[in-house]
Amino acid sequence: MKVKRLKGDALRKLQQQVLERDEHRCVVCWTWTEAPPHHIIYKSQGGRDVAENLITLCRACHTQLHDGGAHPIIAHIRSDIGAKTVLEYIFRGMLATPHV
């Protein structure tokens, strides 16, 4: 099933909303970042362009994730827990403390 993708201004607006929601902080190491948010469920796997499927990662943690990083928080995010649960963790601050 092909999922419609946001483009241009609509995508930039969504990315900015996610960065603001996450206070421009990487949910893994709490580093301040302007990097575009990461899809929890990859677009190639049907992940949608919605805030609930996006998290803020700094470039280093994002690279680690795509390189098969074994960081426990990244593994948790990639597990099959669903975007809502990840957001609950973020908003409770459970991922918002340094874990490096």
Image: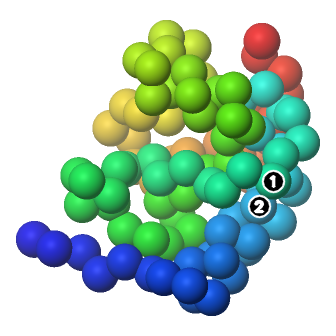
Callout 2 crowding tier (Cα within 10 Å): few <14, some 14–19, many ≥20: many
Task: Name the disc covering residue 69, or none.
Answer: none
Does the rendering let one see residue 31?
A: yes
Residue nearest the observer in this picture, 85 or 10: 10
User: Mark 1 belongs to which amino acid?
Assistant: Glu
Residue 32 location (% of width, % of height): 89, 42
Q: Are the residues at dot 2 and dot 1 in contact (C-beta closer than 8 Å)?
A: yes
Task: State left or right for residue 35 relative to residue 69.
Answer: right
CA distance separating discs 2 and 1? 7 Å
Task: State left or right for residue 64 relative to residue 39.
Answer: right
User: Mark 2 belongs to which amino acid?
Assistant: Leu
Residue 81 location (% of width, % of height): 39, 41
Residue 92 location (% of width, % of height): 76, 46
> Of all residues shown, which one is farthest toward the left?
1
Vertical side of 52 occupied by 42: above or below: above
Element under label 1?
A: loop
State the residue position of label 2.
Answer: 19
Does the rendering let one see residue 94?
A: no
Q: Identify the residue shown where x is 25% and y is 53%.
A: 44
Vertical side of 5 occupied by 33: above or below: above
Residue nearest the observer in this picture, 54 or 91: 54
Residue nearest the observer in this picture, 18 or 10: 10
Q: Identify the residue shown where x is 86% and y is 34%.
A: 31
Residue nearest the observer in this picture, 49 or 63: 63
Element under label 2?
A: helix
Of marks 2 and 1, the one in the foreground: 1
State the residue position of label 1.
Answer: 34
Please identify the quadrant where the C terminus is shown.
top right
Q: Identify the residue shown where x is 74% and y is 71%.
A: 16
Residue 61 location (% of width, % of height): 65, 27
